[in-house]
Image (spheres, rainbow, N blue to C red):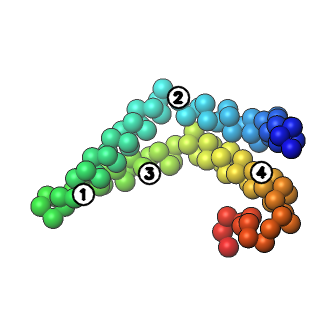
């Protein structure tokens, strides 16, 4: 059984969908994108830390800046391309899961959303 699993993993790794995902994942480390992602992470941490004091201070500015940064990230072509490849890989893996586990048990949920 382990041999078949290893063979399945090898086939997945050779598939164009997986290869495309690997390439797109590497593009996330673009020197222009790292500062933007870092900024978003810092703002997110600041917002979460300050949120507990929102009854005493205004956090509207940091919230707005965080929203603007998240929009800038989501509109970035590298991020959009990455997400497309990510979702394509998830669909492939979901199809493989259905094939492998179909008919084993009715208790196994094969759909992400029911």
User: What is the CA distance from the residue labelled 2 to the residue labelled 4?
Assistant: 26 Å
Please name the residue that numbered disc 1 is placed on: 51
User: What is the CA distance from the residue labelled 2 to the residue labelled 3?
Assistant: 18 Å
Horizontally, residue 37 falls left or right of residue 56, namely: right
Residue at 80%, 68% in the rendered image: 105
Earlier-in-chain disc, 4 versus 3: 3
Please report contact status of discs 1 and 3: CB closer than 8 Å, yes or no: no
**Residue 92 image label:** 4
Residue at 33%, 41% in the rendered image: 42
**Residue 30 image label:** 2
Please name the residue that numbered disc 3 is placed on: 71
Give percent across and percent down for residue 21. 69, 39
Give percent across and percent down for residue 10. 82, 35
Q: Nearer the viewer, mark 2 or mark 1?
A: 1
Q: Residue furthest front?
A: 1
- Name the one closer to the observer, 25 or 74: 25
């Amino acid at each position: 059984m382990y041999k078949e699993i290893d063979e399945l993993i090898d086939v997945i790794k050779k598939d164009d969908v997986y290869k495309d995902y690997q390439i797109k994942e590497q593009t996330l480390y673009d020197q222009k994108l790292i500062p933007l992602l870092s900024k978003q992470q810092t703002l997110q941490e600041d917002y979460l830390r300050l949120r507990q004091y929102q009854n005493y201070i205004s956090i509207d500015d940091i919230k707005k800046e965080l929203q603007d940064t998240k929009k800038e990230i989501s509109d970035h072509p590298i991020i959009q391309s990455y997400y497309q490849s990510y979702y394509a890989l998830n669909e492939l893996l979901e199809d493989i899961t259905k094939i492998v586990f179909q008919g084993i048990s009715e208790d196994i949920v094969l759909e992400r959303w029911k």
